[in-house]
Amino acid sequence: MQFKLWMLHLNLMSAKRYIKEYLAHHLYCVWRIFKIKCYFTLNQISITYWGVKVGKKCSFLGSTIFRRYPETAIIIGNNCAFQSSDWSNIVGICRRCMISTLKKGAVLKIGDKCGFSGAAISCAESITIGDNVLLGINVIVTDTDHHSLNAKQRFENIGITSKPIVIGNDVWIGTNSIILKGVNIGDNSVIAAGSVVVGDIPDNVVAGGVPAKVIRKL
Ligand SMILES: CC(C)(COP(=O)(O)OP(=O)(O)OC[C@H]1O[C@@H](n2cnc3c(N)ncnc32)[C@H](O)[C@@H]1OP(=O)(O)O)[C@@H](O)C(=O)NCCC(=O)NCCS
């Protein structure tokens, strides 16, 4: 279908103009589709190795890092996209997507049609992400502090606080934002770029800043 459209395009304009304006872009699109096919196999090996449940028609650009702790679950819905190469998103990805569970009993659940670009999601207890959720470049979602506030306990890996995170449907989280433990983000809300979200955000709002506050209603 796409190829037919390109041919139609070509017929409607001079070859010279096509080469100057469109060729590089179309070759890039073909290269990208080819890469998605290649990376699918690579990611499939990792998914099988780590026992991650992935729905149908998910796509991968670059190799996602999965790490599933024993007796935990990572469940990903249909039609999700994971971008993990520095060339896979023009806004500028700093690292591969990292999807991990850290502690026995943890459940990390991602809905359908979600998009991730260099996102790091680490789950010690429970992280639930709804459908149609977009996480901008380099977003961090973590339901645990990873270290204790108590200096004596810090190096013994005890006294660490974790609280579940719920991100609703149709949420868009701006680039470089951090979503911390215990946060609920309501349906259809937008988190502005570079925010640190430490408290609940209601449905249908734009929120942003450090710490994130509601900026306006949508
Ligand atoms: C959230 C966003 C879409 C809002 O855009 P907008 O509706 O045009 O917002 P405005 O620029 O009119 O700003 C509205 C208010 O929000 C504030 N604001 C906007 N972005 C903010 C941010 N990142 N952090 C804190 N406050 C922010 C503005 O200062 C302004 O405050 P004021 O009314 O007191 O002056 C946009 O700011 C943003 O963050 N886009 C994210 C882009 C991104 O990360 N893309 C991902 C690519 S993968």
Image (cartoon, grey):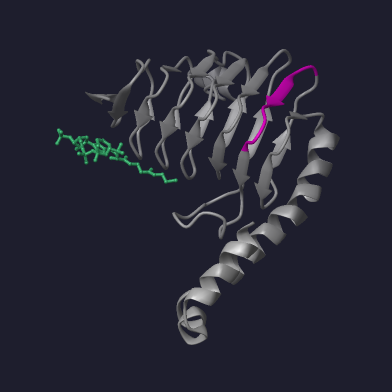
59 in the magenta segment: no
In the image, residue 104 above or below residue 5:
above
Left or right: residue 195 versus residue 83 is: left
Left or right: residue 176 versus residue 206 is: right
Where does the magenta region start and end? 71-80
In the image, residue 169 above or below residue 176:
above
- For the residue pair 209 and 62, the one nearer the viewer reads as 62
Residue 156 visible in the current orientation: no
- For the residue pair 211 and 35, the one nearer the viewer reads as 35
Picture quadrant where residue 211 is located: top left
Ligand 1 resides in the quarter of the picture at top left
Question: Could you tell me residue 166's position as x and y percent?
Answer: 51, 17
In the image, residue 3 above or below residue 43:
below
Question: Could you tell me residue 58's position as x and y percent?
Answer: 68, 39
Question: Could you tell me residue 57's position as x and y percent?
Answer: 71, 38
Residue 109 visible in the current orientation: yes
How many discs appear? 0
Which residue appears at 36% of the width and 31% of the height? 191
Which residue appears at 35% of the width and 39% of the height? 194
Which residue appears at 81% of the width and 49% of the height? 41
As drawn, which residue projects farthest toward the left?
216
The quarter of the rendered structure image containing the N terminus is bottom right
In the image, residue 175 above or below residue 24:
above
Magenta span dominant secondary structure: loop
77 in the magenta segment: yes
Question: Could you tell me residue 172's position as x and y percent?
Answer: 42, 33
Left or right: residue 92 versus residue 76 is: left
